[in-house]
Amino acid sequence: MQEKVGPLDKKDEKFVYTSGSHNCGGRCLLKVQVRDGRVIAITNEDDQPDTPSYFQLRGCLRCRAYRDRLYHPDRLLYPLKRLGKRGEGKFEQITWTEALDYIAHKTKKVMQTYGPEAIYLNYGTGNGGQVSERTWLKRLLSLYGGYLSYYGSYSSACTSIATPYTYGTNQTGNSREDWVNSKLLILLGWNPADTVWGTNTSYYLKKAKAAGAKIIVIDPIYTNTAVGLADQWIAIRPTTDSALLAAMAYVLITENLYDAAFLDQFCLGFDEEHMPEGILPGNSYKSYILGVSADQTKKTPLWAESITGIPENVIIELARAYGTMKPAALIEGYGPQRHAYGEQIVRSGPVLAAMMGNIGIAGGWASGKGNEARNHFVAAIPYENPCKAKISVFNWPDAILHGKGMGGDFSVQGVKCLSTNIKLIFNVAGNCLVNQHSDANQTAALLQDESLVECIVVNDQFMTASAKFADIILPADNMMERNDIVQSWAYGDYVLYMNQAVETIGQCRNGYDWVSDLAVRLNLKDEFTEGKSLDEWLQYLVCETAKQNPGFPAYETFRAQGIYRWHHDRPAIAFEKQIANPSQYPFPTPSGKIEIFSERLWDMKKPAEIPAIPKYIPTWEGPADPLIEKYPLQCIGSHSKRRVHSTFDNVKWLEEVERHEVWINSMDAATRGIRQDDRVQVYNERGKIELPAKVTARIMPGVVSVPEGAWWMPDSQGIDQRGSINTLTKYQPTPLAFGNPQHTNLVEIKKI
């Protein structure tokens, strides 16, 4: 066994345990070999044998490529100040003193002139550590008077908001080791082979398949998950998932395959006999499915075929499989809820789970890709934002343009309306300021207008598309250059210590260091630091974590091991207590039941876009939009295995693994004279991008995919030469969650 040592060991060669802290879908234990102060190799070796009961946390190709990013020649090494117009990308080198003096001056001015709601800390997921730059800024700004915060995420906005209307919580997922108890796994818009969704998720799916489970993948793309694991691939048009689930419900009802007793006992609103008082007849879910509601349309498989592109007989067979193979797990990915009415798919899936009684049992699945029904407490840096105003993570452009007076109709929570527009933006460890936000061209124009946002501060490792719009850029340290603690990503029973492997290069600084210096300028150093060093804060986190986790190791032991695992005797089953003992453990909804019909949604009085029961709503720029005559291809932004959103896009080695290219069906390519590797232009009214074509039968006709995360790089004509899908996406938040609809796009493609 190799010796494990901390970052201060001065041997010529050492092995350091660390992990990744990006929003990559997993958290892996990395063993970093350091020689003469440089990382020379990254492996996943573990002291424990790799067994079914103790499997190693094996990193993917992104972990293996991390050395290339650490030593990338384009890393930012010095603080920079903007020259010329904002967005031109012209900067001059300045000192840290000058940078922090400037930021402190702007922060004081904005706070004194406009108040805390004018200061916005933008969403970003480049560093998810417990002592990340984002955490320290939140703590400092909270001490200074507060800041405008956000709710939701670009990944799961509709899921996080809509799911509680059905269950009262987002903790709706069984733990992954329970999948071996399923007879059928339906993966709807979910590709864990590339997106990971918890380290070793594919391993759990393989175990389920080996135990006899049938796996069906429903996706516009014949994904790597479908290739490697599925018994059946069903291609579906983007934005139409709710129509498919409605048609499946029709089969289950008309063929009497559903569990009426479960619905009667645990659910509100399935049929007319179980509706809230005062609701007129015809508003139940069953009435909607059978066509006796207001639209007078039966949701038959034939009806759904014309919408989804899935043949009628395939829908019938799928419904019968789900209706006869119990327990079954219908697991929705985050992709289907990233469209114009993404809230509907989030609420549609649980209805089928309830119809079959697949909730609260081993082998079942309650809802979407909900959080695991098991908590592991890991302490966090304390802070309390005194500013109660919040906006949706996606709505900050509205808060820039007309924040003063903006209220609940534009996502505001916590206050009746905002008192000011956003005037100061901190964008740390993230690329959502431009690259990951919708309509990059419009967003860029918004940020270029210096009469709106007065100051933009970016803290990053590279000159990203977002960094180009900064007034001040602060160079960040790399995850190999810092100590930190990271939790498992969504699913996983462990926590990891990130040991610093090498010294920080250039003038890059850890977030705690520079935020502490900013605290000095705001006269808050003592309150902010409490006299603690970064190492002492990490010791504090371990101590607080140990208080609620008996057996948690001491700080030095945890640091040396690099990992602590929780062990459980059995899988976690979401809502097991509610189903076993409903009188003692009601669902955390207003009625205490699973709310297929939501009175809270009914009371919003917006039935066309926010119905009280889940419905299929044809989307703008969907297959039923007349605009399809001009732009006949539906464009989605699938996740790439070579990137973590926009992180790693500049790593050449990963470009060799998977080139950035637009996927187009062979028939669609042939009608346009496009061949494999041709450079093509993908365009609509919002913009144009150019990139190579991948001509393939692995994507359904009428659909194209531009993998999200490529860095926005417009030329002098405004044509994006790298191929960022957000050049093409529309800024129009979803109606309930105010989420991002970035899979709702109509485009055309032509050969250049």
Image: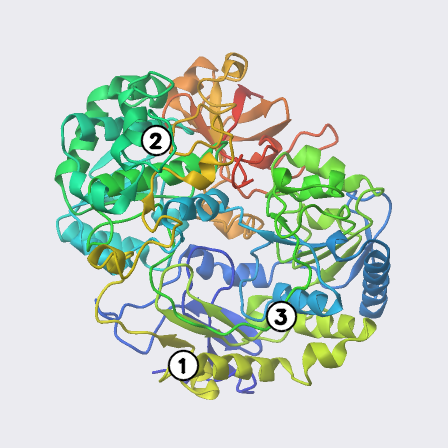
How much space separates mark 3 and mark 1, taking CA atoms?
A: 29 Å
Residue type, label 1: Gln
Q: Quadrant for the N terminus, please.
A: bottom left
Mark 2 / mark 3, whichever is N-terminal = 3
Q: Position of residue 190 (x, y in %)?
A: 36, 43
Count the labels in the image: 3
Which residue is under mark 3?
A: 383
Residue type, label 2: Arg
Say if 239 sits above or below 164 in the image: above
Judge the density around disc 1: few (<14), some (14-19), many (≥20) Cα neighbours within 10 Å. Answer: some
Frontmost of labels 2 and 3 is 3
| Position of residue 47 in the picture relative to residue 467 (left or right) | left
Mark 1 / mark 2, whichever is N-terminal = 1
Q: Is residue 508 visible?
A: no
Which residue is under mark 2?
A: 698
How much space separates mark 1 and mark 2, taking CA atoms?
A: 43 Å
Q: Is residue 713 visible?
A: yes
Contact flag, marks 3 and 1 (Cβ < 8 Å): no
| Position of residue 319 in the picture relative to residue 245 (left or right) | left
Q: Position of residue 382 (x, y in %)?
A: 59, 73
Frontmost of labels 1 and 2 is 1
Frontmost of labels 3 and 1 is 3
Element under disc 3: loop
Which residue is under mark 1?
A: 561
Contact flag, marks 1 and 2 (Cβ < 8 Å): no
